[in-house]
Amino acid sequence: MLRRLAPSLRRAAASSAVQRGGGGARLPDPGLSSPHALPPQWRRCASAAASSLPPPPPTPPQGPPRHAGGGSAASSLNPAEVAKFAAIAETWWDSQGPFKPLHLMNPTRLSFIRSTLCRHFRRDPYSAKPLEGLKVIDVGCGGGILSEPLARMGATVTGIDAVEKNIKIAHIHAASDPTTASIEYCCTTAEDLVKENKQFDAVISLEVIEHVANPLEFCESLSALTVPNGATVISTINRSMRAYAAAIVGAEYILRWLPIGTHEWSKLVTPEELVLALQRASISVEEMAGFVYNPLTREWSLSDDTSINYIAYGIKKSETPPTMPHQ
Amino acid sequence: MTPTPARASAHALLRSTRCFAAANRIRPAARAFSGVPAGAADPQGGPEKVGGVRAGDDELDVAIVGGGMVGLAVACALSNMPLTKHLRVAIIDSNPALKSTNYLKKDGIPDSRVSTVTPATISFFRDIGAWEHIQQQRHAFFGKMQVWDYTGLGYTRYNARDVCKEYLGCVVENKVLCNSLLLRLQEQKEAIGKMIYPTRLESLVFPSKSRNVGGAGLKPPSTEADSLGHTSKELRRSNLVKLDLSDGQTLYSKLVVGADGSKSNVRQIAGIKTTGWSYPQSAIICTVEHTTENDCAWQRFLPSGPIALLPIGDNFSNIVWTMSPEEALRHKSMSSEDFVMAVNRALDFGYGPHPSSSSLDHYMERLFSGVGDTAASTKECFEVPPRAIGLISERMAFPLSLMHSHDYVSKRLALVGDAAHTVHPLAGQGVNLGFGDAAALAEVISEGVSVGADIGDLSLLNRYENDRKAANVAMAAVLDGFQKMYSVDFGPLNVLRAAAFHGAQYISPLKKNIISYAMGDKKSPLFS
């Protein structure tokens, strides 16, 4: 069901970015965004890739803030996106509410995370609590719908979210179960935690990267939060024609699963871009899987098809990364 | 970028990752970033500790109300799966039989409450390790079956060889099924005494919706939830189902399983509505004795309803005879000699002639020889069942009804077995549906544990309902014809199908009987 990321995809990651960096966009134009230019937040990444024919120097973790003042102002988060989620925060645990798609997808996302983390940390998959003793952070935890299952699997979970309201909801909801009451919820950003030199065995950030202001910096923050040889899991929506049809037209306009405007086409990230961004942040993507929805059974399952929703698992390289095999 | 070095480095990374993971396990318990103890390193199976406060023994994961066959099967299945064996499970039932620790004697007179378990149920029992206990107690496999009707026009003989199996089913006393599950549970759980609460359910309080964070917003401030042990305990319990028992104890559980039969108290408290009706029929059950061993299941459709004679080992057979309530009363009160005569009449010449090899059969055979796949048993001749020589148990009569619960689940509740559905007691068919429920529910709970779900979560439990409702409705109300039933591997229904395919299509009285029997309602407007 899952597949190892083929080396060819890694090549594709580099080459596609190079092509687009050169202005020759291959993506279909949905008519909403300018197709010929990369989203601004990707420019740095793309140009870096485009100019990466000579071996780039190993990128140091991007610790220091770009803006003065620190706090959430220095985060890669987009204030408008934060406000958007604050408005619907209270409905997090309503399985029929605006987060219905996440509730539906949750078991599938968790089975990917469970199987990859069990393999990564060599845990017994037949254990009821295979993540026992692992420090895991859920970046962009929302109401805690991922953090709670991770805690039930035995992990020592930290959940962070930039929206104060989400953290409150998550905290109250988790308190009702002894296993989840131990989750450490905190209203902060990945960047701020990096500044505090926090590190985790596994860093998980699902359906977040498409909402951040600067995905590359975000990946670098995630990397900085991961211990060497630790695991990183990221899921998001592809910027493909099918994703546009399914996640924006379908889920927002037709099915009304999501409030209109939840996802902006131009902010979506393709698997190639994600692999590249993570690679530049010293995380090598090892495995990737797509999510497909079966409208008859109303269930999601994992597949090879990453054209709409997908999830990636990578390993943070150890302190002395092997030379990039560009030459 | 060349693939080979990338791969090699990936492998190197993987190797070092393993070392890291090994080191990680030795490392003392991690601390979260704020310096607060990182909480729960719960030993599996034990009560969990939260900030030093023990989750009490009265807090459960699964509370099973009703320790009958299906309730015990749920407990047994949960204790046998790697992901669910650590769950704290309780069974609430005052039945003293739940104290049994020995095999039931094989040489006694068999109980008249028996079930015909299907191959699917047998494999479920094997999976959960309970079948070997059944093999140590009384049970009777049968490999042959004969179905015929009072009109004398048709009969069907069915043989396990036709479907390349050793048997069609197995007749087991209900008390043997219960006892085997109980013995298996005792092997799995040392402290089974603590698991079984020999009392009755007094009341049940489900967590109110307003306490959920979802709708009502930010009620309890987080500081309050954290500050004191007992406050967090209250908050925790407000999210669990509260069960008050008649001996004064109170339990709290994440999930309540209603396995308390067709008049389910749990279902009524939960306010789940049912659809159903009583048939103008009753069934008489009892045990009879023959001079020789019976090795075949027999079923004859009479004008008032079917009579079945099922082997139960040695020279004993079980009778399930459906008739009008007045007739049932009369048959129950007549002398046992008269009753045995009535049984023999009903299984032999009463109500109509034996089916004979007539021109009709040759016609049928010719008709179906072209269709191919002629089963060996089509050549077998009609046989007369062994005569009963004596009644050796009490006669029990019970009214028949069909009932189907609108919902099998709600938040923190699942109904299984007769609590969710009762069907016409066609040779103990109902209990096979119940065991199917038990297996499916345990499987769904296991899936839930694997992805860290709250096991009382409605969206998880809905998967159990979706799985079982289709199967149970198909069995209870066979409206889509025999096609849906074709997926069900069950001897007697296979026989009905065989009967339908071999002859019933062209013999309308039998056809009507079979369909209305399978439908469970002769008065169904669709067939009038």
Image (cartoon, grey):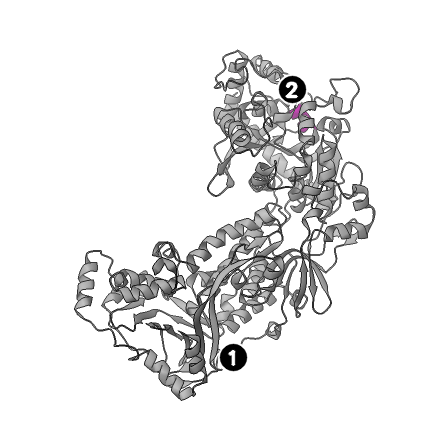
Vertical position of residue A132 compared to residue B366: above or below: above
Q: Identify the residue at image location x=63%, y=41%.
A: A94
Residue B75, label in figure: none
* Residue A307 to residue B405: above or below: above
Q: Residues within 10 Å of mark 1 (few under 14, many from 20)?
A: few
Query: To which residue does mark 1 refer?
Result: B105
Q: Which residue is mark 2?
A: A58
Magenta span contains residue A223 = yes
Please indicate whether residue A24 sits to the left or right of residue B343 in the image.
right
Image position, residue A164 (x, y; %): 74, 32
Q: CA distance from mark 1 to mark 2?
A: 78 Å
Q: Chain of mark 2?
A: A
Where does residue B188 sit, x and y in percent of width and height?
60, 63
| Residue nearest the observer in this picture, A35 or A20 | A35
Q: Is the stretch drawn in magenta largely helix, strand or loop?
A: helix
- Boundaries of the magenta span: A218-224
**Amino acid on which the number 1 mark rests in the picture:** Lys
Q: Is residue B248 left or right of residue A234?
A: right
The image quadrant where one finds the C terminus of chain A is: top right
- Residue name at image x 67 percent, y 30 percent: A85
Residue B269 visible? The answer is yes
Q: Is residue A203 magenta?
A: no
Residue appearing at x 57%, y 37% in the figure: A101
Q: Does residue A154 appear anywhere in the picture?
A: no
A106 or B451: nearer the viewer: A106
